[in-house]
Amino acid sequence: MPETPLDEGKKHSASRWSLLGLVVACVCGFVFVAAAVTSNGSDLRPAGGDLNSVVSDRAREAEARRQQLVDLQQEVDSLTGAVDSAALRRLVRRVERLSEPAGLTAVEGPGMRISLEDAPRSVEVPGLDPNLLVVHQQDLQAFVNALWAGGAEAVTLQGQRLISTTGIKCVGNTVVLDGVPYAPPYVIEAIGNQGRLHAALEASPEVTTYAQYADRYGLGLDQRDVDNVEAPAYVGSVSLRHATPLAD
């Protein structure tokens, strides 16, 4: 039986739908592959998407990687000890002598603990920049630098050891330390002569300014002496990427 125009229309319509279905399938496949590559096996939209959950997730991930680094370093040390080389032994002894001043060994002793926190959300001051009611990286750096100036033997932030190459950066209303985000309150601990540490804090103009804002606007500030502070060994990279020599 010869085909009628109606039959030809149906064929063309079926062809168009088949082509459209093929295009949709290709697009879906591309999206799925792109999502898999982007997520790298993780959830692109994890449950509990609030800031604290995201910060906690990133901190746990960073801690797992840090522990992996510790395990690998122990393996390297074990393999190094098995090598019978006088030159290597001399280098190892030199590294051991420099490890403590570089912050690569755990230490403990008397010192102090400082806690900094954002002002309560209920604080509203007309005309005042809201950023002045939040703890920033420069505030943390001011306290840390003052403690170093006071002769601190070791300083930690959120339990992580700080060394000369440690970077403290603000990202939103969190602080990132060696790639790990932390939310307030921020706890700084230092080992050293408590009298000298207090004197150094009082002599710092930046610390004094923060203390004034804490009194006036409710920013969190708590300083207290501690009989024993434990500072773990620094386990991150000690390599410098950028450095500029100081002028004489």
Image: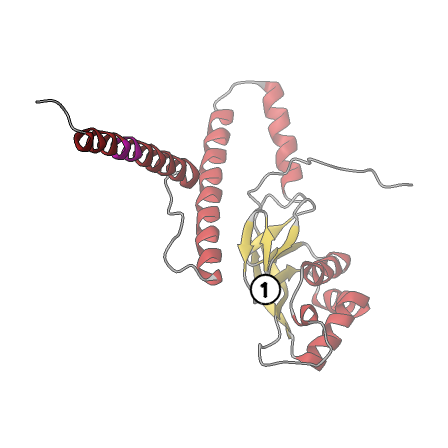
Which x, y percent locates residue 11?
20, 29
Q: Callout 1: 10 Å neighbours few (<14), some, many (20+)?
A: some
Which x, y percent locates residue 244?
80, 38
Q: Horizontal placement of 151 versus 222: left or right?
A: right
For residue 40, what is the image quadrant? top left
Q: Main secondary structure of the magenta part?
A: helix
Give the residue displayed 44% in from the left and 37% down from the top: 71
For residue 17, what is the image quadrant? top left
For residue 208, what is the image quadrant? bottom right
On-image quarter of the C terminus: top right
Residue sitting nearer the eye, 21 or 75: 21
On-image quarter of the N terminus: top left
Residue sitting nearer the eye, 164 or 179: 179
Residue hosting label 1: 187
The count of marks equals 1
Which x, y percent locates residue 127?
73, 78
Residue sitting nearer the eye, 161 or 64: 64
In the image, residue 163 sits, relative to residue 185, either above or below, namely above
Residue at the far left in the pictured view: 1
Does the segment drawn in magenta span residue 12?
A: no
Residue at the far right in the pictured view: 248
Does the rendering let one see residue 204? no
Does the rendering let one see residue 1? yes
Does the segment drawn in magenta span residue 20?
A: yes
Which x, y percent locates residue 177?
59, 51
Q: Amino acid at mark 1?
A: Val
Q: Which residues are magenta?
A: 16-21
Give the residue displayed 69% in from the left and 35% down from the top: 241
Q: Element under label 1?
A: strand
In the image, residue 135 sits, relative to residue 17, either above or below, namely below
In the image, residue 220 sits, relative to residue 110, either above or below, namely below
